[in-house]
Structure formats: structure tokens, C-alpha cells
Image (tube, rainbow, N blue to C red):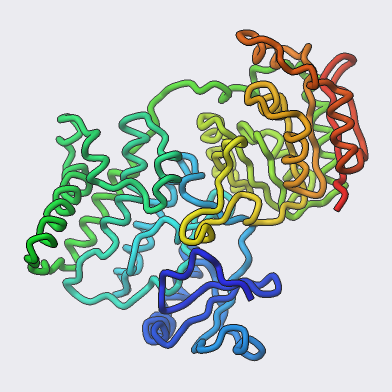
Amino acid sequence: MTFEGGSFRDPSGRVLRHDKRILRAIFDGGVVQFRAAKDSGVLDEMIGDGWLLPADIVSGDGLGDLAPGVAQWLEHPVLDYISYPYEWCFSGLKAAALHHLDFHMALLARNFTLSDATAYNIQFRGTKPVFIDHLSIIPYDEGSAWAGQRQFGMQFLNPLFLWAKKGIAPHAWYRGALEGIAPEDLAKLLGWRDRLSFTVLAHIVGPAAFERDRVAEGLTGKTRREVKLPKQRLIAMLTSLRDYIAGLALPTEKTVWDDYAENNSYDDARRAAKHEFVASAVNGANPRLLYDIGCNSGEFSRTALAAGAQSVVGFDFDLGALERAFAHSDQVGAPMLPLWLDATNPSPAQGWASAERRGLSDRSDADMMLALALIHHLAIAKNVPLDMAVDWLMKLAPAGVIEFPSKSDPMVQQLLRHRPDIFPDYTEDAFVHHVEARGRIVRQTRLAEIGRLIVAYERRN
């Protein structure tokens, strides 16, 4: 039995992994609120409407010795991949924020509410968000304030505002401050035009001032009178915030690789051969979960899904390309989740005891990996030795496909255009040697007579 490192903050229950099962242990302190939600039918209704992750009540037989003191056990379906908000693209973070607000309002209509507003309670099935924390659902008391207002601002609104209005992607800031972007920090970046917005005044400037006053009151020993918030005013607040977030959009600017699918060194014949190779390799491996490292707009993720992959998590550094991948997957309902990744600095294990948020390689076991048009970016653009780049990629999954462009490739030439060639070991022979040192090449092809080499491997344990 392994407790999930991110579930310790709620004393009413914990999430555990056991024999490839996801269990939720509800302690005595959480039983009353859980039974209230369960007996009212609101949990089953929210699950049926797709807002909330399914949960089955299960017997604790055989589990008590592993986690004593549990009053109620739940079992949840296993999600393909656990992602974090500092890995989501703009459309993903926006979709999660809207889901949270809509879910909260759906609960209020049934006289329930949420005890917090953390973005870590949202996960994705493909591009569709789902709420996962059943113990955050509590009975609503008339007049109670929105307990999660500051948290929602820090983890949803403020990063989205920074992105949409200032053109600054929040990933580095958000990953460095796991609780999100504090309003008192963001307020320092606001211009006078920003402050003309009622939403900015109410949810950024106001909370920033409130926090300064709260700190001052704490130093003087003063206490502030609790203000009642009628339900209709709370719903109006959530509705106004939802309308504002729904209207946010990215600045129109071109990124480096967002049109790579149309602007690269391939002709139609090479592209078709590459698709055929990937489809054949995926069909042979029949992966449940596939990683597409450097997925760009998701072109080959779609090929992998068509060839039999059950789900895909695509990773890329280019935010423009990820937006295109997200939009397409969302439109067709594909089981593909595009996430932001700096392959030379992937999300680490961090938070409390370096276990609250797990690192990239510890969150799921991919059955297969695609690394197409990627390795030259690691080895040439980022100076990662070729053997280390191959080693990292092959450790991600026991089977996969890796594409190797030689130095004569136009894209590699572009990377070398303004720098000396200090990469004597970046050769095709060395690449093949490094792959075979770690596994077996099961098939390979060359994209045209002097084109790129593409190999499918099986890794040795």
C-alpha cells in the first residue's frame, strides 16, 4: 500500500495505490460529509454528468492492516496519466478553470459546495477535465464565504491572466511556486489599464490588498468581522468570473515550431513512409499508453491512435504547437493529452518531502514512446551527449521509435548555422551503437535514399 504524496493535506482521507488499484481511505473525520453527499444522490449525479471521477464503495476486507482507522473505502478508475497545472497548455488550464467553476455552480444548485479550489483536484481524460477529490464536496451553509477564492485566483485566474494579458507563459513561475501566483505578486505587474477591469479589481487587486491588511492585522492582534455571502451573490461571483475566463485568449504570436508539420524537410513520400513506419511499429506493440515526445501538433499521435494505441500523452516545448494539438484532440474527442515539457529540465519530484508532486518518469508506465524529429534538438541545440539522449529516451518506455537526422539534414543545418560544430560524436553509426547497447532494433528504414534513419527498438530490462 502506497499513499499518494499529494493527498496528505486533507485529514478526512487519503488516496492510496495498491495492486494497481486506486483506493481512497475515508477516516472518521470525513465520514459525515461523505455520507451527506452520497445519501443525497449528488455524487452519483455528478459522476453521471461527467463532472466527477467515478467512485465505488468497496469492502475493507484485507485492507485494514495496511491502513488502520479507515471508516470507508472507495475505489476509483486508474487514470492514464497524472498531470499538473504547470504542464498544461493555455487551453488546458482554461478548460480546467471553467470545469471547476461549472462544477462548483452545479453543486451549489444542489445545496453543496467545495471546501477548496486547488487546480490539483482536476485531471484530464484526453482533453476533457474531470474533478477527482470527492472529499472536497461538502454541504453548503447559507451565507458562507467562498473558501477557495484566493486559491482559485492563485492557481487558475492569475496564471491565465499573466498568459493572456501579458503574453508570459506561467510554467516556470508556477512550477517554482506550487501553490500558484499570489495576487500580491501579480498586482505589481498590473498597469492602470489592467485595473479598469472589474474582475481584475475584485479577484487580483482586492485579494492583494486584503492579504496585506491581514498580515498587518496579525501583527497588531486585530481581528476582522466575518462577512456573510448569500448564495445568489456567490453564484453571481462565480458566473462573472466564468464569463471573464471564457473570454481570455492567447496573444496572436507565432512560435518557432508551431507550423513544423507543414514546414520541414519532408516531401510527401517521406511523410507517408514515416507514417507507415510508425503505424506498423505501434500496431506490433499494441500499447495501452504511448508517450509522443516532441509531439508538435499531434500528427503522429493521431497515427499511433489509429494504429491501436489506447491513449497518448504528447509532450512538446512549443506552446503554439501544443495549442493546435489540444484543439484538434478536443474537437474529435481523441484520447490524447498534450502537455508542455522542457526535455532538458522535465518536471521533478517536488513539494513536501519531494513527494507531493511526482516527477515525469514516476507518474505512469508508458508501454511505448515516439521520439520523432527530437534527438537533434537534445544533442545539438542543448549539448546533451548523444549516448545520454538515447539513454533518457529509451528509459521512458520498453519499446519505441526514434528518428535520427544526420548533420546533412536541413533542420540540423539550421541548428548549426550560428555556432561551431563541436559534435564529432553525433553520427548515425554512434546513434545505432547507443540504441543497440540498450536494446534491440527490431526494424528500421531510411526516409528516402539519403534521408533520416528511423528505428523501432525493444529495450532490454
Residue 213: x and y in percent read 11, 54
Q: Is residue 40 visible?
A: no
Examine the rendered structure and indicate whether residue 314 appears above or below residue 276. below
Q: Determine which quarter of the picture holds residue 234.
A: bottom left
* 87 versus 386 height, above or below: below
- Residue 79 can be seen in this image: yes
195 in relation to 57, above or below: above
In the picture, the quarter occupied by the N terminus is: bottom right
**At 36% across and 41% down in the image, what residue appears?**
160
Closer to us: 214 or 86: 214
Residue 268's image quarter? top right
* Residue depicted at x 80% and y 28%: 274
> At which x and y percent is residue 370?
74, 39
Q: Residue at point 35% right, 60% down? A: 117
Would residue 284 be found to the left or right of residue 355 on screen? right
Residue 62 image position (x, y, % from top left)? 66, 89
Report the side of 260 relative to 166 (left or right).
right
Residue 447 falls left or right of residue 185: right
Query: What percent of the width, then of the height, locates residue 140?
Result: 27, 75
